[in-house]
Amino acid sequence: MLVLLLLLASVFSYMMYYRYFPVKIKQWFSQDVTSEHIVVDVRDYQDSSKGACNDVVALPCGYIRRYFSDIPEGPLLVMGSNLVECNVGVRQLKRLGFNVEGYLIIGSDKRCNEYLSLG
């Protein structure tokens, strides 16, 4: 019984760490992003499709493992609507071997093409 309780506690602790413990990378702002960065939008398709940006890879967190081959090589920035979404996206991309330099937080009511201008 004690082993089962310890196993459940460790699984719960890992889940909490994976979602809520902040990743150790820098938060970027829209004016800091240049055209050499590849921005991966990990928001839901309903949010990321509003005012879509041409230079942004829209790939929600649930689809990263399946479609990571669609992400070009280079320094990545993860764009999400909140910190939890960014944490999950960064952890998945780092686990797949990508060089993630930071994250951007954009509200779900904001349009990508108004917030981010990659020139």
Image (cartoon, rainbow, N blue to C red):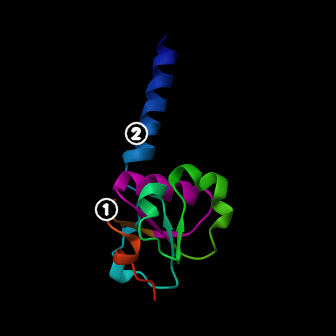
Left or right of 6? Residue 110 is: left
Lower position in the chain sequence, tag 2 or tag 1: 2
Q: Is residue 9 above or below residue 103?
A: above
Q: What stretch of residues is rendered in magenta?
A: 77-101
Tell me if residue 26 comes above or below residue 92 in the rendering: below
Residue 82 locus on image (x, y percent): 34, 56
The residue at the point 32 percent across, 66 percent down is 110
Q: Residue 112, image x and y in percent? A: 40, 71
Q: Residue furthest right?
A: 69
Q: Residue at x 46, y 89 (%)?
A: 119
Under circle 2, the secondary element is helix
Q: Which mark is residue 44?
A: none
Amino acid, disc 1: Gly
- Spatial CA distance of label 2 from label 1 is 23 Å
Q: Amino acid at mark 2?
A: Met
**Is 78 colored magenta in this rendering?**
yes
Query: Would residue 41 appear left or right of 26 to someone viewing this image?
Result: right
Image x and y of residue 18, in percent: 45, 45
Residue 38 versus residue 13: which sits nearer the camera?
38
Which residue in the structure is indicated by mark 2? Answer: 16
Tell me what residue is drawn at x 66 percent, y 66 percent. 70
Q: Which residue is mark 1?
A: 107
Q: Residues within 10 Å of mark 1 (few under 14, many from 20)?
A: some
